[in-house]
């Protein structure tokens, strides 16, 4: 392993956390398959200063360039992934490693980059991503501060409001298939009020955003809300806090995609962003050529939904531009929160077996 490395490449000076996590997770899987050491992305030049979070060097980009120049290099890109079967990245990487006979070679660096494949192909790296984020320098302490602000007696709805360098809101019909555009503020506002009213005020909102808190005060009117904008170095802790909520409201961003991926809770997605399919279904990436092909994950999911009929359980809910939230999604969030009172290891209670005869 000493002379073998798996390295996620960084484009330019680097991107946001959600973007960088995808190739990093893929490089981790490559390291497991090939018996190599996984290196973090070169965060030294990233304007978001992620090197402070993950303990990497400011000059890591120089070391990465030297490594690629001094060792035999193989690149695992989207074409290689598809050529070796696609699907689960571990399986595709196994075939790629075998084809290049990397197990027989003592020195090499495997590079990978890009967000292709989405999160489904790196499912096996979900725990790696979670532990990496939680072990980052500021995350654990920040999470203590965040949860001290939360009332444990009420369900928590996480609102991710992305503004910053995103494009300005557009008309609902212009969102389909597009990322990196801020969602309409009035959608968040109507959605929050819809949740608040349907849950009779027995709910609280954790509002996470890259915008200053004073720009988000419109969301706090009439609802119980908690902000994290005053907590410094919160990139990782905000993501983990969103993933821990009872219900997640996503922005159309890779950061929100990761929050939903790391969570098991129900989540809401801006309906006009989805690509419509027959039968009343919608998908995030169904407009892409690769997802329109037979056998693609989206086509397979659509076939399964049609076969299962209207009773198919769901975790994700599309919310119309009006902001009216389906009551069933709120019931799931309420039930998730209520489970804490029946959690034995947290001083909860559980029903005893009926009419059980105990041994004498």
Image (spheres, rainbow, N blue to C red):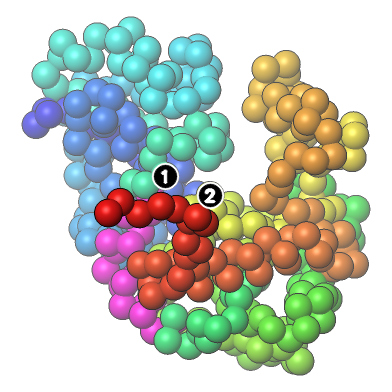
Taking the spot 31% from the left edge, 77% from the top edge, the residue there is 141
The answer to which of 152 and 276 lies nearer the viewer is 152
- x, y percent for residue 140: 31, 72
Label pair 1/2, CB-CB below 8 angstroms:
yes
Residue wearing tag 1: 126
In the rendered image, the quadrant that contains the C terminus is bottom left
Badge number at residue 27: none
Q: Main secondary structure of the magenta part?
A: helix
Taking the spot 73% from the left edge, 86% from the top edge, the residue there is 201
Residue wearing tag 2: 261
Quadrant for residue 215, please give it. Answer: bottom right
- The answer to whether residue 134 is magenta is yes
Residue 336 sits above or below residue 80 on the image: below
Q: For the residue labelled by badge 1, is the local secondary structure a helix, a strand or a loop? A: helix
In three-dimensional space, the C-alpha distance between marks 1 and 2, rounded to whole angstroms, equals: 8 Å
Taking the spot 23% from the left edge, 47% from the top edge, the residue there is 62
Please say whether residue 170 is visible from this viewpoint.
no
In the picture provided, is 235 more to the left or to the right than 360? right
In the rendered image, the quadrant that contains the N terminus is top left
In the picture provided, is 343 more to the left or to the right than 319? left
- x, y percent for residue 178: 74, 48
In the picture provided, is 149 more to the left or to the right than 291? left
Residue 226 sits above or below residue 108 on the image: below
Q: Residues within 10 Å of mark 2 (few under 14, many from 20)?
A: some
Taking the spot 78% from the left edge, 84% from the top edge, the residue there is 200
- x, y percent for residue 331: 72, 64
Q: Which residues, given as a range, are shown in magenta?
A: 129-146
Mark 1 or 2 closer to N-term? 1
The answer to which of 263 and 320 lies nearer the viewer is 263
Q: For the residue labelled by badge 2, is the local secondary structure a helix, a strand or a loop? A: helix
- The answer to whether residue 144 is magenta is yes
């Amino acid at each position: 392993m000493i002379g073998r490395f798996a390295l996620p490449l960084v484009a330019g000076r680097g991107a946001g956390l959600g973007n960088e996590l995808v190739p990093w997770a893929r490089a981790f899987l490559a390291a497991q398959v090939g018996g190599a050491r996984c290196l973090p992305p070169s965060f030294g030049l990233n304007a978001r200063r992620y090197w402070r979070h993950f303990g990497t060097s400011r000059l890591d980009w120089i070391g990465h360039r030297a490594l690629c120049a001094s060792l035999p290099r193989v690149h695992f890109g989207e074409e290689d992934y598809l050529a070796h079967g696609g699907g689960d990245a571990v399986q595709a990487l196994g075939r790629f490693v075998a084809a290049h006979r990397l197990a027989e070679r003592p020195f090499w660096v495997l590079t990978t980059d890009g967000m292709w494949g989405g999160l489904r192909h790196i499912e096996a790296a979900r725990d790696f991503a979670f532990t990496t984020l939680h072990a980052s320098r500021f995350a654990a302490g920040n999470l203590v501060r965040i949860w001290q602000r939360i009332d444990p007696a009420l369900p928590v709805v996480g609102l991710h409001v992305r503004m910053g360098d995103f494009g300005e809101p557009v008309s609902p019909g212009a969102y389909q298939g597009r990322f990196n555009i801020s969602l309409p503020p009035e959608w968040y506002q109507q959605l929050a009020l819809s949740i608040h009213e349907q849950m009779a005020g027995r709910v609280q909102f954790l509002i996470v955003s890259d915008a200053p808190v004073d720009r988000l005060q419109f969301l706090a009117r009439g609802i119980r809300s908690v902000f994290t904008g005053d907590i410094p170095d919160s990139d990782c802790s905000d993501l983990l806090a969103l993933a821990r909520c009872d219900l997640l409201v996503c922005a159309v961003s890779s950061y929100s995609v990761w929050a939903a991926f790391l969570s098991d809770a129900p989540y809401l997605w801006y309906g006009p962003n989805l690509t419509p399919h027959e039968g009343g279904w919608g998908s995030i990436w169904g407009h892409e050529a690769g997802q329109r092909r037979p056998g693609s994950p989206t086509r397979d999911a659509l076939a399964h939904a049609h076969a299962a009929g209207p009773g198919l359980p769901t975790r994700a809910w599309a919310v119309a531009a009006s902001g009216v939230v389906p009551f069933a999604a709120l019931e799931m969030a309420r039930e998730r929160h209520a489970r804490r009172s029946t959690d034995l290891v947290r001083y909860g209670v559980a029903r005893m077996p009926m009419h059980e005869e105990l041994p004498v």
